[in-house]
């Protein structure tokens, strides 16, 4: 992990209702700190805000002279609104790559599940996978749907769903997870990122089929590196781990879903 | 031109190569920030607060951002004093940096037991936390009642052997000098202040407090003027060296605390935005001392000229 104080915004696009994609020049950050897909960066958002904002890496790659990290985020509050308003060419201060991500094997067969703003990091997983994965992608409505073409390029199959039925399957992703796991017994693991209720339901579906499930958790964060201990995640054994350093990806069986 | 200012300071017999420490609870046991730079760059590390037994702390969310500040409600999550001595102290000892263990107890006896263990293990100083706002038992209660603060101080001193005892004071009191005097009379070697100020933030969309514990401790630049004022008051009331902290994020902030009477300073919340903040504070402080024509940074301590 390292601090790159002046990461140039190489490219900025609006993907869907409120979702912004930014590609950042991050020096040698990927070369020096990439572990797995699903890590995150901690971005300084303006001068008046004391806390950085943790944002999942969508995709990243080594480059010459600079490595590239692509992030996709929603402008939800003051900090992310500041970031979303930064034009291409401007610099941002980035701390990364942080966390452990999804420990993927090159020959693993994966079912990727993303919900809402949890969809983008699954694209990095899809690109990393040696065997083309299946992706189940949930959105609130048609206006929020994003990245489908890019998933289609690297996936065997892409199954979109919307909560209101305005696009793709009408309903939540865990129903599609059950359907897919019932039809296809080859999966080594389910990898999921999204809101906690979604993760809980996906974890339950995976458990029903006896398939390992890894989930990427979210929590309000301070330092991002494991020193301040604010981003606590309740574990099934009664302990509390930390999303930034121990996670953000956990084995679904370790997590206390009732907390 | 290289900086010629002597940066060493002596905090109750503990000589640090520069006056910049990191505040307890913001730096873990140093391992994380040790990946960014050599920990020997800083003067002292106030390690994450320890209790006699392991604690898992409070449920999340434990942090909320506020205007120029943050609220936290971690609740002293830590592996316990024995695990610190076995696993963390050897790591910290690799560096040329003073190690200050921070302890919290549920009873005065627990403070004594921890002091004995830490003195035997060999830390450079023990910071006695009588002011954590985030735990129900002990914690803040010891820090707001002079007779209890004195009792805890006596117990710590009785068991710390040759290791200096620094008592960390709460700002959540009517008159901080009452506690400072009681602790000084009970034998404390140094004082650190301020701990966080109790605060609250409410999400107006959900009508819920942002913190799961409802309230928490405020830190960051917002509290700096409170820290400066309290250090100034305490420095006049008692004859003990002071480790000043509260909202320090640049050299000028550190200089203010020293002018008010602090011998050394600690950086905390600023690290969350910039892991290198303690080094920037140290360098900024050296620049200020040099600009003022001082030969030693220690000359700043107490040099305020009040109207």
Image (spheres, rainbow, N blue to C red):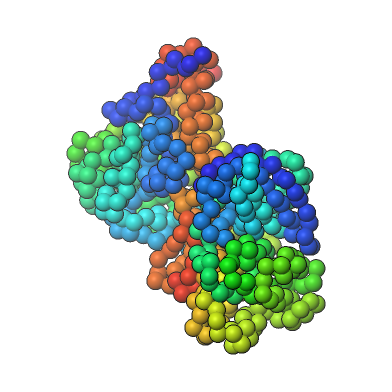
Residue B33 position in % (x across, y down): 45, 43
Which residue is depicted at the point 38% across and 41% down? B46
Which residue is depicted at the point 48% across and 34% down? B278
Along the line of sight, the residue nearer the viewer: B128 or B21:
B21
Establish if B210 lies above or below B34. below
Task: For residue B297, say whether it is visible.
Answer: yes
Residue A99 position in % (x across, y down): 51, 56
Which residue is depicted at the point 71% across and 81% down? A171
Which residue is depicted at the point 29% across and 51% down? B87
Establish if A14 lies above or below B42. below
Left or right: residue B75 compared with residue A108: left
Point out the image quarter for the C terminus of chain B. Answer: top right
Left or right: residue B40 compared with residue A51: left
Task: For residue A96, say whether it is visible.
Answer: no
Residue B10 position in % (x across, y down): 33, 25
Q: Quadrant of residue A182?
A: bottom right
């Amino acid at each position: 992990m390292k601090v790159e104080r002046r990461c140039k915004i190489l490219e900025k696009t609006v993907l869907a209702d409120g979702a912004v994609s930014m590609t950042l020049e991050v020096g040698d950050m990927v070369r020096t700190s990439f572990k797995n897909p699903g890590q995150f960066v901690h971005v300084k958002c303006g001068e008046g805000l004391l806390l950085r904002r943790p944002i999942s890496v969508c995709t990243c790659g080594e480059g010459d002279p600079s490595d590239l990290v692509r992030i996709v985020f929603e402008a939800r509050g003051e900090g992310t609104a500041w970031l979303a308003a930064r034009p291409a060419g401007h610099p941002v201060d980035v701390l990364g790559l942080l966390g452990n991500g999804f420990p993927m094997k090159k020959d693993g067969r994966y079912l990727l599940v993303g919900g809402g703003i949890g969809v983008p990091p699954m694209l990095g997983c899809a690109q990393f996978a040696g065997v083309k994965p299946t992706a189940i992608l949930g959105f609130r409505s048609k206006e929020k749907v994003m990245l489908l073409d890019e998933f289609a390029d690297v996936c065997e199959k892409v199954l979109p769903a919307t909560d209101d039925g305005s696009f793709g399957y009408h309903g939540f992703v865990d129903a599609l997870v059950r359907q897919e796991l019932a039809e296809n017994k080859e999966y080594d693991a389910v990898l999921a990122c999204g809101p906690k209720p979604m993760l809980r339901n996906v974890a339950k579906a995976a458990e029903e089929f006896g398939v390992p499930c890894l989930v990427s958790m979210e929590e309000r964060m301070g330092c991002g590196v494991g020193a301040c201990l604010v981003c606590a995640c309740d574990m099934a054994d009664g302990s509390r781990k930390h999303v930034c350093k121990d996670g953000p990806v956990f084995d679904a069986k370790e997590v206390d879903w009732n907390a | 031109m290289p900086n010629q200012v002597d940066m060493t300071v002596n905090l109750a017999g503990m000589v640090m190569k520069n006056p910049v420490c990191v505040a307890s609870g913001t730096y873990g046991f140093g391992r994380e920030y040790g990946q960014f730079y050599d920990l020997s760059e800083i003067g002292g590390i106030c390690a994450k607060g320890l209790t006699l037994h392991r604690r898992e702390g409070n449920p999340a969310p434990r942090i909320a951002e506020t205007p120029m500040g943050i609220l936290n409600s971690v609740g002293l999550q830590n592996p316990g004093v024995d695990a610190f001595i076995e696993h963390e102290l050897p790591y910290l000892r690799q560096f040329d940096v003073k190690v200050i263990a921070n302890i919290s107890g549920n009873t005065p006896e627990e403070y004594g037991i921890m002091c004995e263990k830490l003195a035997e293990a060999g830390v450079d100083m023990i910071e006695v936390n009588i002011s954590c706002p985030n735990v129900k038992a002990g914690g803040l209660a010891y820090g707001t009642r002079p007779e209890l603060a004195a009792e805890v101080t006596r117990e710590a001193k009785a068991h710390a052997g040759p290791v200096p005892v620094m008592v960390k004071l709460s700002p959540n009191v009517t008159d901080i000098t009452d506690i400072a005097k009681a602790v000084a009379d009970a034998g404390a070697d140094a004082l650190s202040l301020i701990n966080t100020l109790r605060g609250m933030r409410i999400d107006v969309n959900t009508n819920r407090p942002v913190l799961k514990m409802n309230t928490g401790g405020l830190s960051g630049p917002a509290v700096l003027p409170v820290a400066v004022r309290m250090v100034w008051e305490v420095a006049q009331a008692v004859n003990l060296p002071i480790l000043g902290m509260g909202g320090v994020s640049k050299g000028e902030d550190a200089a203010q605390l020293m002018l008010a009477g602090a011998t050394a300073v600690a950086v905390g919340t600023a690290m969350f935005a910039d892991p290198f903040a303690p080094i920037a504070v140290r360098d900024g402080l050296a620049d200020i001392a040099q600009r003022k024509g001082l030969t030693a940074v220690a000359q700043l301590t107490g040099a305020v000229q009040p109207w």
